[in-house]
Image: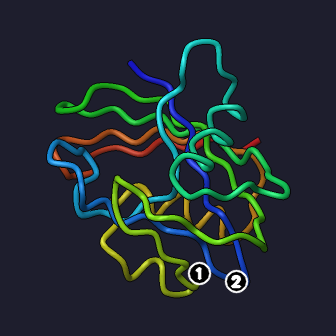
Amino acid sequence: MKNTSLVYIERGGAYLMLLRNKKKQDENKNKWIGVGGKFEEGESPEECMLREVREETGLTPASWKFRGIVTFVSNEWGTEYMHLFTALCEEGEVKECNEGELHFIKKEDILGLELWEGDRIFLNKLFKDEGFFSLKLTYEGDKLVEVKEEDY
């Protein structure tokens, strides 16, 4: 079981998306996701998110919002508790990332990318600016087999 933070950094109506295409062993291989990673010992969700943003993009968000918790259950990858954020970052140059290619993608184009099926569910919640939520996504391989949602 692991804890992670994931953030969608917004700039000019687009989110910074990461195409995971550089690591050999990668549960997200060739998928587009936000920026984030695993907690280090003693980190809060916010500290993890800010560290991962600096490490992967070179950016520093001006502001952020904790949007929800997504529980991923996978027969291949185990269980993950992902702390989901959105952030604003209007300035700064994006550096090269060793995990994949970073691109700002217009929000209306994101659902056309190669995404996890469950990511489409929480991305729609982010796009609609819904309140805090908890979402449980159960996968068998790449197939989403169960969804449970709670809005707060």
Question: In what quadrant of the picture does the C terminus appear?
Answer: top right
Query: Disc 2 versus disc 1: distance between alpha carbons?
Result: 6 Å
Residue 104 placement (x, y as % from top left): 55, 78
Q: Mark 1 points at which residue?
A: 107
Residue 51 placement (x, y as % from top left): 63, 38
Q: Residue at x 47, y 31 (%)?
A: 38
Q: Going by the picture, which residue comes out furthest to the top?
A: 42
Q: How many discs mark residues in the rendered view?
A: 2
Residue 65 placement (x, y as % from top left): 79, 50
Say whether residue 38 is left or right of residue 143: right
User: Image height check: is 34 above or below 137?
Assistant: below
Residue 125 placement (x, y as % from top left): 63, 62
Closer to the camera, 81 or 91? 91
Q: Name the residue under label 2.
A: 13
Q: Residue at x 28, y 51 (%)?
A: 28
How crowded pointer 2 is (Cα within 10 Å; few <14, some 14-19, many 20+) is rated as few
Say whether residue 23 is left or right of residue 137: left
Q: Which numbered disc flags the more N-terminal residue, 2 or 1?
A: 2
SS assignment at label 1: helix
> Within the image, what quadrant is residue 21 found in?
bottom left
Whether label 2 touches label 1, CB < 8 Å: yes
Q: Which residue is drawn at 24% across and 44% down?
A: 27
SS assignment at label 2: loop
How crowded pointer 1 is (Cα within 10 Å; few <14, some 14-19, many 20+) is rated as some
Closer to the camera, 96 or 3? 96
Check the image and tell me how it is coloured. rainbow
Say whether residue 15 is left or right of residue 27: right
Q: What residue type is labelled 2?
A: Gly
Q: Residue at x 28, y 25 (%)?
A: 78
Question: In what quadrant of the picture does the N terminus appear?
Answer: top left
Say whether residue 37 is left or right of residue 131: left
Q: Which amino acid does label 1 sit on?
A: Lys
